[in-house]
Amino acid sequence: MIRPDSPVLLEISDLHARVEEQPILKGVNLTIRAGEIHAVMGRNGSGKSTLSKVLAGHPAYTVTAGSVSYMGSDLLELAPEQRSRLGLFLGFQYPVEIPGVSNLEFLRVSTNARRAQRGEEELDTFAFEDLVRERLKVVQMDPAFLERSVNEGFSGGEKKRNEILQMALLEPLVAILDETDSGLDIDALRIVADGVNQLAGPENATLLITHYQRLLDLITPDYVHVMAAGRILRTGGKELALELERTGYEWVDQALASLGQEPAEVL
Amino acid sequence: MSTATVGDLVSQPYKHGFVTDIETEKIAKGLSEDVVRLISSKKNEPEFLLAFRLRAYRQWLQMQSPDWAALGYPPIDYQNIIYYAAPKQQEKKASLDEVDPKLLETFEKLGIPLSEQKRLSNVAVDAVFDSVSIATTYREKLAEHGVVFCSISEAVKEYPGLVEKYLGTVVPSNDNYFAALNSAVFSDGSFVFIPKGVACPMELSTYFRINSADTGQFERTLIIAEEGASVSYLEGCTAPMFDTNQLHAAVVELVVLDDASIKYSTVQNWYAGDEHGIGGIYNFVTKRGQCRGDRSRISWTQVETGSAITWKYPSCVLQGADSVGEFYSVALTNNYQQADTGTKMIHVGPGTRSTIVSKGISAGHSSNSYRGLVQIGPKAVGAKNYSQCDSMLIGDQAGANTYPYIRSQQPDAAVEHEASTCRISADQLFYLQSRGIGFEEAVSMMVSGFCRDVFNQLPMEFAAEADKLLALKLEGSVG
């Protein structure tokens, strides 16, 4: 929902970043206000995933220019765990498995870190178990998943639901979901979308990174941005996503050519 | 501000590396029959024990140091070691008030307060400083239950019959080179005797503290649980930081009769050498338990984090029908440490069962090997073994090896073996950090998760310590 006087939660200015020696982001500009849902679409290699990782503070990426302000503070100054505690959430495209670390314990430690930051009382094992069972309903997950190791042996859909469960527990202010819809069947997709919609509210914001229109059928975006060659090329409303469905990305190549840029590699 | 790397993780200096300034009596370096006699006379030992030592010494002279392990170290000059060192306070004091305060202070600094007010209330402690037991707490309370818990030196004087009956029956002096050496020159260690039907009311613990340089440490421990008896025993060890290597060749013998059980836990944190591999203890230990009785049980749990070299195979001989042997181990090596450790489960009687869970963590440039033997004899009908050996590699310079041996002469026996290798990956660490978990805590969570099956076996007080100890010991790069 767009409201003109909503506070700015995240402001990305002229962001440049590279991984190893390869420049990926070449001047990203984006402003996200409270209550908004943004979608970033683009081909593989356009820099969409890189953007999400840079915002989360992944050590493999180096920012070479530009700035990011989160809730008025310099985001790039903060360690990844600090960013998370302050309410920035990244839902991974490929959530990693961590054998031996109990899902329940991981969720509890993570939730308590956020609560501590907000000046709320930390929860012991029992109190936390009550909370998590309630939040499991948001993603329709079986409590049995709590006993397992983090993401170990989870199907693709279960991993994505575990990400949304974490969102439900951490209550982030800005949630960046990196291709949350990839690898999901229709039912899983509906559950994930339901979860995101339930959690979205006037105080927080969501940034969906996606290839496909179908997620946006279920989660209505306020803004759609098209990314290519490390920059946002075009911004529009939800109709832009439908247009892309119809026309594909060739116009992007033409637009890049006219800017003197090479099209991004299609992987 | 950049993300911390494992390399930045502050390597906690070995905080037990201090030396206690106390008058110590030492004999001259070198080993000979005279030295063996001297040790025996300093301890006022009975004839049978001197004979035991001399026989072992003569056997040792005929033996050769084994060289089959995956370990590299310069040859040990056995004449360049002091075989007896004791703090000048010789006689075991009747009350702790009479113990040299510097000794009490040492143990308090190590987290083992011995004084009445501060001691742990549910654990009896035998404190061994260099080769001498300086104090044993709660002896009277234990005596009320018929439990004997004292140093071996005292046991030899007060219960010679028991010692003579059992000493050397589980690990014969000619069992191996280091056992022979230990049998000749052993100094002190713990003696535990639990009479029939008694469940020992407290946990028993021995804390070994090496203080003198140039000395070898040869502890001897003997634990006997009669029919229906049970006890949980914990061993802890630390040493100062010297830049030479010190030999620690201990022998531990456990005996359980019908329906009895012994749980033996070790948290070993001997000085491991510096980050270039200089100095550190050579920990060459023979530990063995005999399940002589039917339905008896021995459980070994070890957390080995120190020593320049760890070479030990706590083992069980499962003689009694339906007897059970268990081995749970976490061995951490870092910098240039080496470990060749594991267990032997020897199934003799029918219906015997054994469980082996071994977790090796290799970091730095270290080398960590699991070596295990599961042997099923022809009479071990219906025997079962389950073995699981997991390795975790941290960084790209460390090594891990597994040498499992299975020998079975009984077709009606089941032997299962699983092994796995994993690493701490940067992606896993980042995932935890992106959920608000700090870097150090994330590494710790992953290592603890890896060791969970073993830590669950430790007495509660020590499980938390073990977690922290592992976290402190880790320093290296993460790939």
Image: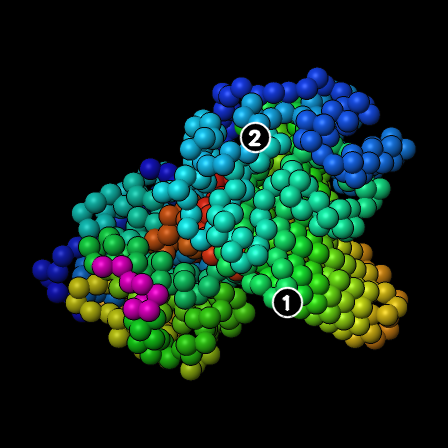
Snapshot quadrant of residue A103 = bottom left
Residue B95 image point, x, y percent: 46, 37
Left or right of residue A242, residue B263 in this image: right
Residue B349 image point, x, y percent: 80, 68
Can residue A76 be seen at all in this image of the molecule? yes
Can residue B341 be seen at all in this image of the molecule? no
- Residue with the mark numbered 1: B228
Residue B232 image point, x, y percent: 56, 56
Nearest the viewer among B283 and B164 is B164
Instruction: Find the magenta span and give its range.
Output: A121-128
Nearest the viewer among A139 and B169 is B169
Does the magenta run of residues contain A124? yes
- SS at badge 2: loop
Other residues around mark 2 within 10 Å, as few (<14) / some (14–19) / many (≥20): few
Snapshot quadrant of residue A27 = top left
Q: Chain of mark 1?
A: B
Question: What amino acid does circle 1 point to?
Answer: Gly
Does the magenta run of residues contain B210? no
User: Could you say which disc has been placed on residue B97 in the image?
Assistant: none
- SS at badge 1: loop
Q: Is residue B419 above or below residue B92?
A: below
- Residue with the mark numbered 2: B91
Q: For the view shown, which residue lies furthest in the top direction? A: B28
Residue B78 image point, x, y percent: 77, 24
User: What distance separates the C-alpha of mark 1 from that of mark 2?
Assistant: 35 Å
**Residue at (88% x, 68% y) in the render:** B378
Other residues around mark 1 within 10 Å, as few (<14) / some (14–19) / many (≥20): many
> Mark 1–mark 2 contact, CB under 8 Å?
no
**Residue at (78% x, 36% y) in the render:** B47
- Color style of the picture: rainbow
